[in-house]
Amino acid sequence: MSSHRKYDAIVVGGGHNGLTCGAYLARAGKRTLVLEQKPYVGGASVTEEFSPGYRASTYAFILGHLHPKVIEELELRKFGLEYYPQPNVFNPTKDDGIIFSKDPVKTREQIARFSQSDAENYPKFFARLQSTIEILRRLQLETPVNPFRKDPAGIMRTLGFAWRYRNAEKEVYNLLHALSMSAHDYVGQWFENDLVKAKFMFWATIGGNVGPYSPGTAFYLVTHLIGQTGMSFCKGGMGAIADALAASGEAHGMEIRCEAWVEEILVRDGRAYGVRLRSGEEIHASRVVSNVNVRRTFLDMVDRSHLPEAFVDDVEGFRARGMGFKLLCAVDRLPQYKGFSQEKTGVDYPAYAHICPTPEFLEQAFHDAKFGWYSQEPFLSPNVPSYTDPTLAPEGKHVVVFQGGVTPYELRNSDWDREGPQVVRNAFAVMDRFAPGFSDSVIDHKLITPKDIEADINMPGGNSQHGELTLDQIFFMRPVPRYADYRSPVKRLYQCGASTHPGGAVSAVPGQNAAREILKDWRWRA
Amino acid sequence: MNRKFDAIVVGGGHNGLTCGAYLARAGKRTLVLEQKPVVGGASVTEEFSPGFRASTYSYILGHLHPKVIAELELKKFGLEYSPQPDVFNPTEDDGIIFTANPARTREQIARFSRKDAENYPKFFERLQSSVEILRRLQLETPVNPFRGDPAGLWKTARFAWRYRKSEAAFYDLVRALSMSAHDYVSRWFEHDLVKAKFMFWGTMGTSDGPYAPGSAFCIVANLVGQIGMNFCKGGMGAVAETISASGAAHGMEVQCDAWVEEIRVQGGRAVGVRLRSGEEIDAGRVISAASAKCTFLHMVGAEHLPDDFVEDVKGIRARGNGFKILCAVDRLPQYKGFSAERTGVDYPAYAHICPTPEYLERAYQEARFGWYSSDPYLSPNVPTHTDPSLAPEGKHVVVIYGGVTPHELRNSDWDRERPQMVRNAFAVMDRFAPGFSKSVIDHKAITPKDIEADINMPGGNADHGELSLDQLFFMRPVPRYADYRSPVKNLYQTGASTHPGGSVSALPGHNAAREILNDWRWRA
């Protein structure tokens, strides 16, 4: 059966990038439909009631990357987006702890408590980091340029790019250093104290699949600090972002259909013209945009006969391995870190912490995972959104959300159903060491492994970036060479998710960039 | 009155000698200064035990570039080598041969996995495309894409034009630079021994293990050699001697036991050197084959160098993680897994001991935290099998390269730990070649620290600097000065610090000489 409704654009996948792209298209007057397989939109930016009365952000949990340009252009505040700054990250030791704050002066004072020389070097470290962050922020908003295009337009783009960045020599070198160095070497250039090193190295462990002693992990460290909104807890959890994006789009006519499983992207004569749902229903549109990861889009949804072999080979080679787990806990009291002291840290309560006392602790956590096992002593990032947003838990109770590692996607000679409980025990054991009595405070909990993430929201390998951020999978090679400009080998089929530049995190930038390219094409060929 | 030359080369390693030999052939009056009593640097043969000689550091001749062999007539000057194309990877009850002949390698693989054998040609093809482009890039002076002057823009444009058709190969190269050796081989192979056999190459040159991003590049970099793998007659010292002889035949002078304390700079120009003896020698041009760190942090006064350049040089990451053990033995090692008819080889004179990928990676874990592997991976080779002149009648020399040994130990030092490091290596040997340790008459163990102390390789790193993206091509040894020049006029760089890096290829020396002679044409 085929519906007669015809849209200008269909966005496959209602994650935050799909919604963003749809919202921009709707604002441009395009009749846009967003299709989401699940009963609600958001993808990895969702809030769920994981235990009666307890709600938490299931996947992404900190709002900080959401791009100000998008917040403003889509009027997200007007459509209900609220967030509370959470600028302090606490790294506990057994008897003390250090605060990383967005205020460099405060952070420097904190560091000075552990190492004078590290405190003196902090501004140098900060300056180097900042220069790399600045250029990444510029690149983020740009559609990657394929330097091998030989048509006049392509050559003009390359020259234009070279011209724009002609004065960025030093920054480019620093960026290449970050892409080549391990997080451990990177921080080792300025810091000597283990806690100080580990505090910054923690950022390098999120979204990657190798330890912070591995080349290239310095880049992860940088990418996690490019957010311009400042680390915040989103009121009502991260689902509120998706809701605000949806509302913003709907205000301009964007339609959303949930529980609509797209089985095939329809292609005729090399052009996408719609989708077919599992129900058999066909919906037609003059353009199709996939927010789904590149593997699923091109290996499952598009018939191979429409794709060049080399392209398929590249897509199959796209490496995406998740290494982190989430643990949502309903607790009857706030975790009490025995190392925490208000007057030493100048913070009322450490609602956001990173538990990784030493660089070695972090690296060891990755070792077992290389051989298909999970960490005995996981590193943890416990945060307590209910501290600033009581609506998430019953009166007097709290929600503690853990992001931790390392848990490989596949286990050697076992499976997650069998090992899940032990992962939780390992995590609680570490937590109890730094916040005694924590495990006793847990009323209920939900563990999410990379396998669960993939099963639930289709992130390949449970990798929150859809694909690891290694040199060959970023910029003009993301998701694959020749198609980093949000387009694809199929005419009128576009990409807009975390698989595309600049990658994962709730930044809405892929969706925004994709919409820009799509509308550009529209201007030329309606 | 100071002696005066057209060019002084600081450091008589194989690259310094090569550069000197090319300059001499171009009619330049050239002096090569070597701190040690013998030339060669890491390409030397030593009598480590009475009657037993071995290549102390580099031990396989395979990277030496055919262009250099031909142009410097090295064969005429006595260079001889015997092919050693087969690498044996033993397991405890079998083993697999990697050979120059793809068809045979494929048969060998088939004994362990049909599927891997079927994929081998695809793997080989992919590898070959990266090897090919690397071979092209090796001979080129890196182009700095940020040069804004007309000449610079012209160079960049020409480079883009030359490589305009290399799009696919370029992407593969970037992948190799980004992927771990483990991921790289796992795209085609499933069998642990097959994976580990290729991953071994991925351990030479990285700072981290073969599960770390970028280690795939080391597989490629270790297989770019174009003359096949060989044992050099008389050991690797013969390479240095023949290059030296080739240069001498055209008037190149070599002075050993000459420790250069300072590269003299006047008015932003290098004018010569000062030896520890106090003697000053003048030259129109000075070329340093010493490492970039050694050259610019010790030999040239900081006042002659821009701060950010010095910063960059300090930032060069050079950590050796391999050890050498030279062994005098009274019989050939007998691998219990070896079978002449299964492998089609009489004797496995060159082996890689690394039964599984996990084995290789585990060897790195202790080193990350300042300790050495309890189960090191090993590369034992027996040069005396083809060159009896290296040992007394009936005796043999076994040269073991292995890892992982960090430059610095946490809470200990190498004088204390060296014996245990050797015991660990022998224990592994005995597991695969029972009785080996009993066959050892004498041995000499060399740690990264020893390498640095003896031949000035920073951190004991064989490449003078790890082969990571930001230390390659136009960023090697540091940005803006990858063209063998330096911030000081008339001061040039060659040696492993420069593109394309370590291994006895003679290419840094060859490329540097080309650039120097270029400049000479413009300003004599």
Image (cartoon, coloured by chain):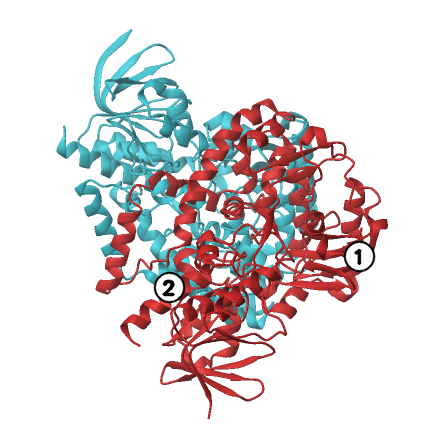
Q: Nearer the viewer, residue A24 or B323?
A: B323
Three-letter amino acid code at the position of disc 2: Arg
Q: Chain of mark 2?
A: B
Task: Name the residue at 36% across, 60% down.
Answer: A171
Which residue position is annotated with label 1? Answer: B420
Q: Nearer the viewer, residue A35 or B179?
A: B179
Asked if badge 2 and badge 1 are on a common chain, one would say: yes
Mark 2 packing: few (<14 Cα in 10 Å), some, or many (20+)?
some
Chain drawn red in the picture: B
- Mark 2 or 1, closer to the camera: 2
In percent of width and height, residue A516 lies at 23, 39
- Residue extending furthest top? A1
- Residue extending furthest right? B438
Tell me which label, 2 or 1, sits earlier in the chain.
1
Q: Chain of mark 1?
A: B
SS type, badge 2:
helix
In percent of width and height, residue A328 lies at 57, 36
Which residue position is annotated with label 2? Answer: B514
Please say if A454 is above or below B495.
above
Chain drawn cyan in the picture: A
Please say if A29 is above or below B58.
above
The answer to whether one can see residue B398 in this image is yes
